[in-house]
Amino acid sequence: MNPKRHSRLPQAFSIACIAAAGLLMHVQHAAAETTLQRIQRTGEVRIGYANEAPFAYTTPDGKVTGESPEIARKIFAKLGVKKVDGVLTEWGSLIPGLRAGRFDVIAAGMYITPERCKQVAFADPQYQIQDTLLVLKGNPKKLHSYADVAKQSDVKLAVMAGAVELGNSRDAGVKDAQLLQVPDTTAQLQAVRARRADAAAGTALTMKGLASKDAAQVETVSDFTDDPKHTGYGALAFRPEDTDLRDAVNKQLHAWLGTPDHLQTVAPFGFDKSNLTTKTAAEICSGK
């Protein structure tokens, strides 16, 4: 036995233990870091969005824009986060993608609903808006409400999978056999133009935007009648454990919404003072 070599074992063991303890502390620190702390440390945040103008969409040159991404940019800049990366996702996969960690926040104009409140933590709403229908020019089926769709069993209504219009139409008596679920708003427009659907349902701003793409063939129903309880309140959404991030965003939102800078930011997307609301996420989540 070499006593010289073995005399170093305790020292080597001690060094190894110290190194392991340091690594463990580093791992524990990293695990304890919240999303808010991480994005402020890195200066980067990832937003999940679906292509639905004017709320969130990709321009032909690849820029992610729309009411919600632009608000996200302003608010996160106030939190010291300058880089906002967009992750394009089908609407129905936004909440699963958020919870799986594919992105840090949903910035897609998502409505707050009691059911969604069980899955995500919403900031307070940044707008309120109501639904309408996209129909063929002249509105040949004379559709002015979800109830009108329900009354005509042969009428097909295109709705975006996972969107609240699915529930709104069912509330009015529209049968599942009448519903054509599609992945995005482009598919809604295509369904109406191809006469696979007699109408498409969505927010008034979204349907107006779709109509502008083919004014010769389609139009929106300007005198749409709907239940006031179907008024939509759109907001940013976070993972349930990220309440510190949600609260930090809320603080900035409350100070900024309704200011000239906010109204100027959202004006290009068709929003104005009429879309402001004093409702809170807590009230909407509780069904009030």
Image: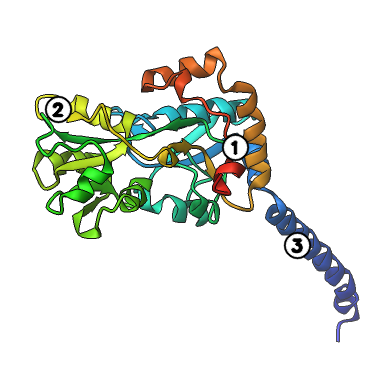
Quick check: can you spot residue 89? no
The residue where tag 1 is placed is 280
Residue 217 place in picture, x, y as percent: 10, 29
Spatial CA span between label 1 and label 3: 41 Å
Q: State which mark lies toward you, 2 or 3.
A: 2
Residue 32 place in picture, x, y as percent: 72, 54
Q: Amino acid at mark 1?
A: Thr
Looking at this view, is 239 or 16 the one in front?
A: 239
Q: Amino acid at mark 2?
A: Asp
Spatial CA span between label 2 and label 1: 37 Å
Residue at the far bottom in the pictured view: 1
Q: Secondary structure at mark 2?
A: loop
Image quarter where the C terminus lies is top right
Q: Is 178 drawn above or below residue 87 in the view shown?
A: below
The residue where tag 3 is placed is 24
**Disc 2 and disc 1 in contact, CB within 8 angstroms:** no
Tell me which corner region of the image, top left, top right, bottom left or bottom right, holds residue 130: top left
Q: State which mark lies toward you, 1 or 3.
A: 1
Q: Is 78 drawn above or below residue 181 in the view shown?
A: above
Q: Residue at (61%, 44%) from the top-left corner?
A: 282
Number of callouts = 3
User: Pointer 1: residues within 10 angstroms few (<14), some, or many (20+)?
Assistant: some
Residue at the far top in the pictured view: 260
Q: State which mark lies toward you, 2 or 1.
A: 1
**Disc 1 and disc 3 in contact, CB within 8 angstroms:** no
Return the mark for residue 214.
2
